[in-house]
Image (spheres, rainbow, N blue to C red):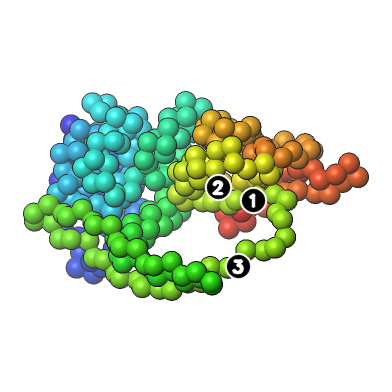
Amino acid sequence: MAVDLANVAPLASDRSETAYRVMVVDDSAVIRGFLTRWIEADPELRVVGSAGDGAAALRIVERLAPDIVVLDIEMPVMDGITTLPKLLRAIPDVKVVVVSTLTLRNADISLKALAAGASDYITKPSSLRDLQGSNDFQRDLVAKLKALGAARRRRMAPRPVASATPVSPAPSASAPASAPAAGVAAPAVVSRRASFTLRQPSRLKPKVLAIGSSTGGPPALFALFGFLKNRISLPIFITQHMPPTFTTIFAEHLSHIAGMPCAEAVDGSAIEGGRIYVAPGDWHMTVVETEAGPRIHTNQNAPENFCRPAV
């Protein structure tokens, strides 16, 4: 069981104490090295430690008190799926990003991990050579870590006060944060008090429900449709930033949770109420008006903000 104790040592003095704390868990020392280097290239992120399997990670995670854990799915001794619930019990509010290669089996496992409490997933290239040359993977990894780190800090900080007309909900108390173990500095928390006003609902009856989501989207959608189960009869369009294969499995999981038909959108298909249409991986999804009525149209136009499908 490998534990990279060198990565636990304090980093350079110019590293901000407010940087999001990241722990890397992967059975390959080479991949751990790549991930660490790419993560620490961003000044908002700090790798506080790493481990070569889930059992080793569990021995040090409370001491390291990370904001985010990057967790490989396939590892010896203790794999990612076995490790995930144990990590969440050790640090209940930690964000976990599961990492897997792009296969049908791993897509299914990754989405089960999301349903079990992981915050997001990322697919890594299947070979080390492809991983080294993948700017997309590096960019996506860093973007997800920063977004999830910010979300965790916001959750730890006092929540914003919401105001709406005619009813103003009272501010809710902040959930207590897990205390770090002795010898580890508490992650810096920036209090962000803000006010916002809820928009008045339209008097027009909606014809469709459209949802766009990216980092953190799948678990949020699972929770939303678990609540909406059998309560909505509109056509529903979902664009979730996901690669091919994953959108296929994602639609299957969502159909089960929502209790309504859900599948990847098919070009030219008619639109029916009470169905969920998911933009297929690597394809944009739009709705076009035809003589026969509105139809779904998919295309491979240029990615927008590096995303296809794009919200």
Looking at this rendering, what residue extends furthest in the left direction? 182
Question: Image point 47% across, 29% down: which residue?
Answer: 108
Give how far across and how far down residue 100 sits, in percent.
41, 35
Which of label 1 and label 2 is nearer to you?
A: 1
* Alpha-carbon span between mark 3 and mark 1: 18 Å
Could you say which disc has been placed on residue 210 in the image? 1
Residue type, mark 1 in image: Ala
Question: Image point 58% across, 58% down: which residue?
Answer: 305
Q: Are marks 3 and 1 in contact (CB under 8 Å)?
A: no
Give how far across and how far down residue 39 sits, in percent.
34, 54
Label 3 secondary element: loop
User: With respect to residue 35, does 244 lie above or below?
Assistant: above
Asked whether residue 223 is in view, the answer is yes
Residue type, mark 3 in image: Gln
Label 2 secondary element: loop
Could you say which disc has been placed on residue 232 in the image? none
* Mark 2, other Cα within 10 Å: few <14 / some 14–19 / many ≥20: many
Could you say which disc has been placed on residue 200 in the image? 3
Hey, which quadrant is residue 112 in on the image?
top left
User: With respect to residue 304, does 112 lie above or below?
Assistant: above
Residue type, mark 2 in image: His
According to the picture, the residue beneath numbered tag 2 turns out to be 241
Hey, which quadrant is residue 259 in on the image?
top right
Label 1 secondary element: strand
* Alpha-carbon span between mark 2 and mark 3: 29 Å
Asked whether residue 124 is in view, the answer is no
Q: Nearer the viewer, residue 6 or 295?
A: 295
Q: Earlier in the sequence, mark 3 or mark 1?
A: 3
Q: Are marks 1 and 2 in contact (CB under 8 Å)?
A: no
